[in-house]
Amino acid sequence: MSRGIGRRTRIVFLCLVLHVYQYLAKDFSLEVDDPIHALVNQNVSLKCLIVEKIPEEWNNDNFGVQWKIKSKDKMEEILYTFNAGAINNKREGASISQDAVKIKNASLSLPNIQFKEEGDYTCVVYNTPWKSEKTFKVTVSSFPAVTLTPEDLKILLGNEKSLECKVSGFYPEKIEIAWKKSKDGKVTAVSSDHVCTGAPVINSDQTFSITSSLRLQPSLEDNGNVYQCEVMHRTFKAPLVFESRLSIEESQSSGSLIAGIVIPVLILLVITAVSLYFMRFKAVSPKVTEFNIPGPIKHKDKATISSVVSGFRPDVIDVILKLKRRSQDCIDIFKWHNRKPITSKKSDNSYEIIPINGTVDQDPHCSFKAMITKMEKHSDGTFSIICTVSVTPDIDMDAGAELVLEVQHSAVTIRKSVTITVIGVKPRIHKVIVPPVVIHNELVALTCPINGFKPRPAAITWHKKEVNGKEKEVLRLEPDGKLVVEKNREGKKPKYSHGISEMEYEEDSTHDVISILTFVPTIQDDNKASYICKVYHVATEITQETKETIYVKAAPKLDAIQLSPDVPQSESLLTLSCRVHSYFPQATLEIVWYLEGKRVEKGTKIGDVIKANDGLFYCTSFFKMIPTWRDVGKVFTCEVRHESIAEPRTVEWKLDELVSVPVVTDIKSDPPLPEIGKPMTLSCVVKDYYPKDCTIAWVQGFERTDDGMETDEPEFDEERRVYSRKTQRTFIPTMEDYGSEYTVEIVHQGITQRPPKNVFVMKFKGVPTVGDIIKGTDVVDYGQPVTLSCDVTGFLPKEIQAEWLHNGKKVHNNAIKLSGPDENGFYSLRSIYQLTPTARDFNKDVIFSVKHQTLKKAVIKEAYISLSAKPPIVSDLIIEPQTPEIRRNLRMSLTIEDYSPEEIKVEWYRYKGSFEKKPVTTCTVAENGLFRGKSVLEFIPKATDQGGPIRCEVMHPVTKEMKEKSFVLFLKDCPVLSEINCHPKFPKLGEQATLTCNISKFKPKDIQVVWFNNKTKIQSGVNTSEPKCHDDGYYYLTTELTTTAEGKGDKYVLQVSHQLLDEPMRKEYVMGLNKTTEDSQIKCLQKNPKAGEELTLECTFKGLKESAEIIWHNNGLLLDAETWVNKPSRDPPGIISTLTLTPAESETKCEIVCEASDCYLPVGDHKLTLYLC
C-alpha cells in the first residue's frame, strides 16, 4: 500500500480527533528562525513571535499555543500546549514564559536538546476564532574532535611511516576526510593508494568516530612537504585542516665516500630481498573487526552493519557468513571464495554484489543480505575487504539471532559473532472520539485511533466504568484476532460489537489501527459512564489506555395535539395539549406555543414531569383559550427545544371548523298548571348553535314523541354567527302522565344531547307532588344523628297520608308540618324524620310513602344511608386461670369491637389441629353505633398441648381483614421441650453428629428420656444430664444423642415421660445431609482464572427438585440473583446452577459458596476456593 494512502488515512485520523474544533481562520503573521542548528546538550530557544495583522479583538484569555514535532521516521506529535494558562507538557523541561506570552511571544525553551529531537517543528498560535502556524527545521549535531599525529613527522631516508588522522565525537554520521600535500605554496591531492580510511563506529553516546591513515615512504625530494588532513562536517562552515610537516633525515656517519655508498647499497639489497620475501611470499594473518552494530534494531527497520577484514596476505581468502536463529539450525547465508588477484575496487551501490569466485546463499526469509562492498590492495602487499550486511529483522524470527562471520585464510581462521537485538515500537493511543450527541436507544460508535506501532500483535480491550466506580470489561480483541464479547445473561444478542480498520505501511512496516466500539446506549446503563480503550502491545509489553465519559441524551418525541373537548366550541374553553415524552435530561427542555406564528404565553402550562422506569421523562404541555369564529383557519403550533436536537421539533393543528353547542331555554307550559283532559302546550327555544343542521325531538321519560310537535325554521344571527329555532308540542295529558319528565333531544354535529336541567315535570291541579328526600348532612356516620325531610305540595283535598319506613317498619317519631291553602287553594306539607344510624343500617334504605285520593297508588321515595364498612378491633387473649394446669378446665376469651357490618368469622386453633368444642361468640350494638362482640372457648389441656401455640383468627369478610391473637401454652409443672438442634447442621454421609434437646420447668424431679431412630429405641450414644433445680423452683436438664449420619431423611424421636403427663411427650428431627462430597460438585470453567476477567462457575445438585432455592456467596457476601441461572439436569436428574462472576483486579482469592434448600429438607452447601492469576 502506498505511503500516499497512509498519509490520507492519517489525515482522516486527525479530522476524527479534532472534528469538534473548527476554526474560522483569519491568519496573522508569525516570525520564526528557519533553520535552527543546535549542538547536543545545549539549551535551545525556538523562536515564535506574533507580528503584524494582530486582530483588534485579540483576547489574552483565549490565547493558546501548540508546539508539534515531526522527527525522522515518526508521525507528528504534540510536544507542548498552552491554552489560556493551562499547560500540557509532554517534553521534560520545555517551557513558555507566561510573561512573554503577554507580549505576544510564544517561543519555546528546550533545555539539554538531544539527537532524537531533530526534526520539523510547528508553532501553532490561536486566539479563537483566529489561528496561524509556521513550520521550521531544527538540526542537532555534535562537533567533531580531530587529532593528527604526529604533528612533525621525521623519517629516515628510505624508511616508511604513517600519519594518522582521528575524528571522534561527531554527529551525524556523514563526514568527509581528504589528504593533501603542500610544497612551495602548491597544494595537490594525495593518491588514494596510500590512504586507508575505516568505517564510522558508533559510540555509547550515539556519536561517531573514524580513523584515516596516510602511509609515507618519501624520497629526498619530499623533504619539507606539508601533509594536510582535511575534515568536512555539517558543523563546519568550512573544512577543518590539520597539518604535519615532513623532515627527511640522512645518515650522519663520517666514513669514506665509498663506504657511504657501498654500505647503504648492500643494506638496501638485503632489505629489498627481505621485503620481497615478506611482501610476496610470507603469509600475513588478517585482522577482523567486530560488527559495528548500532544497538537494538527496530522491527522491520533497515540497518547496515559491517566488518573490516584487513592486512592479510596472500589475497586467497574465504569469507562465510552464518546465521543461527532461535530453535533453528545454523545456516550459511553468504559465501565468498577469492582465488583471483585483488585490485582496488569499491561498489558504487551498497546493495551490489561484486563478481567474485564462489557462491552467494541469501537468507531464505530475506532478513539478512550480505555483500562485499570494498576490496583494496595496499602498497605493502597486504589486502583488505569490507563485508557489509543489510539487516531488516523480523522480531518474531530474528530477535536473539546470532550472526557469525568466519574468515578462512592460509595463516589463520577467525570467527566474529554478534547477537541481533530486535525491539518493537510502542503504539501511540489517541483520545477516544465520541459523537457530539449520544442518543438514547440509537446506535453509537466510539472510536479509538492507535498509531505507529510494530509489529502488529496487540490486544485491544474496552472497559466500562460505571458511575459508582465499578469497572468491567465489555469487549476484548485478542492479538490473534479472536473477539471476546461480554455475555448477555438474558440470552439476547450481546450489547457490544466491534469493528476495526487497519493498515500497514510498506515503508517502515508500522501499523495504524482504528478500534470502533458500537452499542446502543441507554440512560440507565450508560449516562455518565466512562469507556476506556486499552491497548497491550505484545512486543514492547507496554499497556496504554485512554478514557472518555459519555453523556447520553434522549431526543424528545411529540404526540399529535389533542383537544378537550374533542370538537372545539365557540365561546367555550378549549384546551390544546401536546404530550412530550422520552427525553433526557429534564432541565433543558423548553416548550413554546405559537398561534399563526406568534409566540403565545398566556394560557400555557406544563403539567407534572414524570420520570419513567427507563429513566426518561414525560410531560404534557397545555394551551387554554376561548375560540371565536374569527379563529377559524388559524394554525396552532407546539414547539420543543432540547439540547439533544439541533433544530426545534414542532407539531401543528389547524382550526378548520368551530362548533357552537345548542343552548335550550327553560320549557314553558301553557297553561302553567295543566289539568287532566284539557289541551296543553310545552315550548322552548334552541339557540346559539352552529352549524345550521340541528334536529329536535320531544321526549317523555325515555321515549321520543312526535305527536303535536311543531318546529320553526332556523334563524341566523349575522353578528354572532349562530342559529336559533323555536319548538313546541301540544297534547292532552292523562293521569298516566303524572310525574312524567318532558325534555327535548337535540342532534347536532352527530352528537345527541338531552339537557338535564331543561326538564318539565308534569304536575296536575290538586294532585300531590312529592319531592326527593333531603339529608341534613352530606356525611353520615355511625351514632351521629341525621335529619331526613321530604316536601309534598299542590294537593287537594286536604286529607293525605304520609309516613316513614325504617328497616321495613313504620316510624312514629316523625314530625309533619301542614300548610295551606295557597292562592290556588292547594295544600302542602313537610315531613321530618330524625335518624341515628347504627351498624344494623349498613346498606339499608329509608322509605317515605304518600297516599292521596287523587292517586291510584302510593308515591314512594327512597333514601340510601351511605355507611362505610369498619374492620374489627381485637383485644389480647384472656386466660383463666393465668397459670394453666394439666387436666384442669381452661377458659380463653377475647373481645371484638367497633366493626360493621355484623357478619364475622371466629376460629380457634391449637398446636395439633382445631378444638373439639366450638367457641361461643356473641354480638351487640354499642353506644357508638358499631358492633361489639366476645368469643369464649373452654377446654381441658393435655400433655400434647404443653409448649404448643394456641391461636385465634377473627375474619371480617366485607373489609377482608383478618386479625390474629396467640400465646404459647405452658402447663404448670409439666416439662417443656425445646427444638432439637444438630451439630453440624448438615453432616456428611458417615460423619458423626450430635442432637441436643433442653427439657425445662418440670417437677417433681423424676423424669424418663428415651431416643428413637425410625421407631427403634437407641441404646448407645445417649447422654442425659441429671435434673438440676433452678432459682424458680423448677428442674432443668439437657439430653444429647451422638450418632452417625447414615442417610438423608433419617427420623429421630425424643420421648419424655413424667408423672404429671397422661401420655409421653415427643419431639421429632429429620436428618439432612451435606451433599458436597456425595452428590454434587462445583467447578470453574476457566482453566486459569484471572482477576478482572469474567469467570463462569457451575454447581450441580443431583436429585434436587426444580422448586429448590439456590443462592451464591463470594467471600462471605451474597451475590445478586441476576448473576446466576438455574436449569434442570436430566442426566443425572437434578439442577445445574451457573454463575457468572468478574472478580476485582485486586482480588487474589475467591471463596465461592453455593447453597441449596427446598421446602422439606435442608440440602447443604458447596464450597470452592479459587486462586486468581
Image: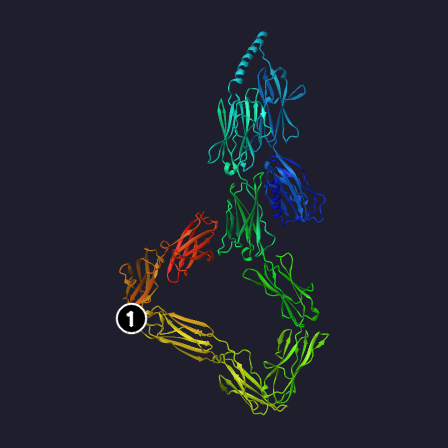
Question: Taking 801 as reference, is 23 left or right?
Answer: right
Residue 113 placement (x, y as % from top left): 60, 37
Comparing 702 with 586, the one in front is 702
Residue 930 placement (x, y as % from top left): 47, 78
As drawn, which residue projects farthest toward the front? 707
Secondary element type, mark 1: loop
Picture residue at 60% right of the left edge, 58% below the top: 555
Question: Taking 848 as reference, is 629 left or right?
Answer: right
Q: Quadrant of residue 880?
A: bottom left
As drawn, which residue projects farthest toward the right? 719
Question: Which quarter of the rendering shows the N terminus?
Answer: top right
Q: Give the amino acid type for the residue marked by disc 1 in the picture.
A: Asp
Q: Quadrant of residue 774?
A: bottom right
Question: Taking 809 as reference, is 430 left or right?
Answer: right
Can residue 439 be seen at all in this image of the molecule?
yes
Q: Is residue 88 above or below residue 787?
A: above
Q: Quadrant of residue 10?
A: top right
Q: Is residue 345 above or below residue 661?
A: above
Q: Is residue 911 above or below residue 288?
A: below
**Mark 1 — residue?**
1062
Residue 364 placement (x, y as % from top left): 51, 34
Can residue 150 be seen at all in this image of the molecule?
no
Residue 412 placement (x, y as % from top left): 48, 23
Residue count near mark 1 (Cα–Cα under 10 Å), binned few <14, some 14–19, many ≥20: few
